[in-house]
Amino acid sequence: MTDPIPVAVLGAPGRMGSAAVRAIEAADDLELVAGIGPDDDRDDALRAGARVVVDLTVPSVTKDNVLWAVSNGIHAVVGATGWTEESLAEVREALGDAPSTGVLIAPNFAIGAVLAMRFAEVAAHYYESAEIVELHHPDKVDAPSGTARHTAAAIARGRAAAGLGAMPDATASDPDGARGAVVDGVHVHAVRLRGLVAHEEILFGGVGEQMTIRHDSFDRASFMPGVLLGVREVASHPGLTVGLDGYMDLGAH
Amino acid sequence: MTDPIPVAVLGAPGRMGSAAVRAIEAADDLELVAGIGPDDDRDDALRAGARVVVDLTVPSVTKDNVLWAVSNGIHAVVGATGWTEESLAEVREALGDAPSTGVLIAPNFAIGAVLAMRFAEVAAHYYESAEIVELHHPDKVDAPSGTARHTAAAIARGRAAAGLGAMPDATASDPDGARGAVVDGVHVHAVRLRGLVAHEEILFGGVGEQMTIRHDSFDRASFMPGVLLGVREVASHPGLTVGLDGYMDLGAH
Amino acid sequence: MTDPIPVAVLGAPGRMGSAAVRAIEAADDLELVAGIGPDDDRDDALRAGARVVVDLTVPSVTKDNVLWAVSNGIHAVVGATGWTEESLAEVREALGDAPSTGVLIAPNFAIGAVLAMRFAEVAAHYYESAEIVELHHPDKVDAPSGTARHTAAAIARGRAAAGLGAMPDATASDPDGARGAVVDGVHVHAVRLRGLVAHEEILFGGVGEQMTIRHDSFDRASFMPGVLLGVREVASHPGLTVGLDGYMDLGAH
Amino acid sequence: MTDPIPVAVLGAPGRMGSAAVRAIEAADDLELVAGIGPDDDRDDALRAGARVVVDLTVPSVTKDNVLWAVSNGIHAVVGATGWTEESLAEVREALGDAPSTGVLIAPNFAIGAVLAMRFAEVAAHYYESAEIVELHHPDKVDAPSGTARHTAAAIARGRAAAGLGAMPDATASDPDGARGAVVDGVHVHAVRLRGLVAHEEILFGGVGEQMTIRHDSFDRASFMPGVLLGVREVASHPGLTVGLDGYMDLGAH
């Protein structure tokens, strides 16, 4: 058996961060060597010998953390959202001087959501109709969810690749907006129910048949397999990878 | 065994009418004595000895058919929609002179849809959140469906009876209308997919739990048990009954 | 506003007990006056003025607790399972001397599961086919679940009341037992999946249609509305009531 | 626009055959040049100029039809089941002398079922638990369905490739067989309900999440897109292809 990979977590006291700390501690092939909070010195991670840092901080500091990791030759697995093309370009440039270092920036660590999006893109080639229903707890402030928007974009790519045009829809009267949002040509519906967490149902229809792909996240714990996959694989993927699917065996496309 | 009930169908050549003709012919306890089309004389039904007429004609003639049936002492089971309070009052007045005659006017003969609506009203007492997703073929011109509107009204009645206020919903940003229509305070979402027929999913949520009631109509045949129930029961329910649930054993409420 | 009801919890340190303690403390119309553990003196509840006790102890002591409550004129809401007809008879006899005292023994406090069972019994009158799929976490040791067995019994009662015979099933070859268990004439299937908690799906089929009733328990918190309903209503229901549905407005049947 | 592809159907009077005839007639890029029944001379297809034959006959004659097509330089799209390794070897040998001729033998023309199976194999890499529920009309004589058996095999392949062992299952008491069949280590449950046609639900579970892939066939028409895909693509795939997925863009694996 090989030695465990030494890992540091930036943003360790946060909700995602503390879940990541627990998941890393529980994994036999990983060793948590530093948990860094906003008041700590991130160079403690270097002194502790971290080979991979998991950055679960906030958008305002995440880019600086990634550049710091790259300049120190440490691989980085990053969960924060809000990256712009300019920020990504800066990371790519920094990586030019560190050709063996890997950076994974993953807006979504839920493997199931990533799988659902990829399956949706493939299935979209073969169905006349496709719609999305996303369901969340009622404390969510935006609708539809970012995952639903990304899924709509994936369906649109699949349909375009297959040469499909607009979906059939004879709706002539919809005074109250029951048909929902249209994102990249795909109708998206947002349900809010007490008791739910984060759920997505992708519906495809053709003559005489229906296909449904559904993903349910019941708990933040569902993100941890994705974080661990990133930590284990980042050293084998030098350069910048955006999206967890870059590390998953989903077939070329 | 008792003699079969002699039944006539008005609107026999139509899609619902011809399905009703087949269903009555297939039932051992019923006998089809006349199938009347728009060019036929409805008095043929009297001459053939009909004791019940099933009216599956169009809104413009259905009221006249019902008054004709009542004046001839025949029970009527009616599927046409578009009845106004004034039309119903005329029928009630006519029935005043025919106290043993029964009339059933049922906007929906799908027993499953009627059950779903009643269950929704009961469940609505006990859940903080409730929403409706209706799914139909893409040739449907209106959204949401009439069944979904009636279900929203039933949920609103249940919530009011339980003293529940507005549902929780923190949505602050919904630029594309993903939250759908609001009918009687209930969010209603309309999905249109090739391959589907008529489907309704009613979702309830409370802390730590969800309840779902779903009805799928795959085929017009699903309306026939409701038509036959009406034919068998109408003689035992003198006066006017609106809604098939008046003949179903759903418990007092 | 009336004074809050003083409530004591027996079995307060357990998982259900501590959830009940929190739920009672959070309710404006209830006041927790005592939380009794296995090493405490239950008479503390009397001294603290409890008018209702919630018994969430283990089968071996629950009957003694109920008889103690009745003899002291305190209403009891009881969650423990394992009651025999003999034990229930003892409680009924004790209540004979305390005509204004109420006891609720509820094998299942999940309002949604109780609703699902009642809806299933009603729907069973109207469908040719009915089956149950229950889904739980993989640490559950018995299959199928008690709730699924009770639901099968409810479906059997509904079918019997409607005069329905055996369900259609042409299965001639099933070498590996894919058709699952048969409980009271109803096929019951048990799924075990990591990530799930406790879920039940009840499926009804007729010509051209399907009806589905599903209940998902994601969290023990889903039992608390049922416990609180019991506490609030027990004083208005003198005598012994078995099953939470006795307190719910489900219509006579 | 290119000329339409001339197509002949063998087994044209059968249920699948007549559906294929209608689908080909309705497609602008295909031309039906012959519909051959059991009493017709299949050489009529040659005389009519067919470049592709669709064989929807019975197992006893399908192999002979394929060999006849290959020997005449016509591509063949074949739906019959019951092919043995020996029969496939004969076809491969015949194709050795006809290197530009294509033969597709597809046990399942439902694109959705093929997609579901492939998605299941991919998803199986990432989940601790997986089970299958298949649902059919109650006139089906075997359980579980062939599609469910193939899906279980696909899940087993995916789990093996990911190095996953047995699924978690603490079931100690299951007196009535509620846990269903075990096929290649995967639990499979068969539901039979009046009103259904052919449906499959594949369930995956991990800590804090669930993924569901469902395919519904409501009508034989759902097989026709797969037949047409085969007809359009067979000329571009010389040699023998078994399984419609060989013609679909599902990514290398």
Image (tube, coloured by chain):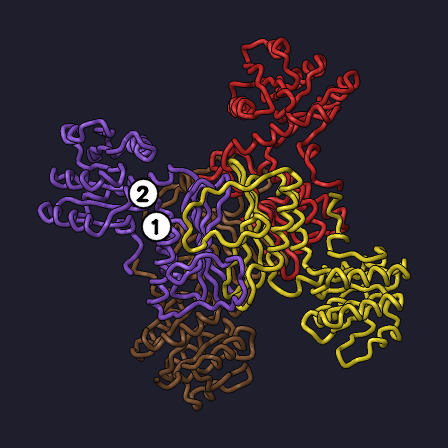
Chain colours: A red, B brown, C purple, D yellow
Quadrant (top left, top right, bottom left, bottom right) of the C terminus of chain C: bottom left
Chain under label 2? C
Q: Nearer the viewer, residue C226 or A51?
A: A51
Identify the amino acid type marked 2: Gly
**Dot placed on the residue nearer the N-terminal end, 1 or 2:** 1
Q: Is residue D197 above or below residue A1?
A: below
* B30 relative to C227, above or below: below
| Image location of residue A123, percent across then percent down | 68, 49
Above or below, comparing residue A233 to residue B157 in the picture: above
Q: Nearer the viewer, residue D134 or C109?
A: D134
Residue B213: x %, y % from top left: 45, 53
Q: Residue at x 79, y 80 (%)?
A: D40
Front position in the image: B215 or A28 = A28
Q: Secondary structure at mark 2?
A: helix
Image quadrant in which the N terminus of chain C is located: top left
Q: Looking at this view, is B221 or C111 the one in front?
A: C111
Labels in figure, total:
2
Badge 2: how crowded within 10 Å, few (<14), some, or many (20+)?
Answer: many
Q: Is residue A153 visible?
A: yes
Q: Position of residue D54 (x, y in %)?
A: 78, 67
Residue type at tag 1: Val
Badge 1: chain ID = C
Is C42 displayed left or right of A52 in the figure? Answer: left
Q: Are marks 1 and 2 in contact (CB under 8 Å)?
A: yes
The residue that mark 1 highlights is C114
Q: Residue at x 76, y 46 (%)?
A: A161
Asked if residue A205 lies left or right of residue C82, the reply is: right
Q: Quadrant of residue A109?
A: top right
Q: Residue C78: give x, y in percent of width and height.
A: 25, 42
Q: Which residue is mark 2?
A: C226
Q: Would residue A55 be found to the left or right of residue D229 on screen? A: left
Label for residue A156?
Answer: none
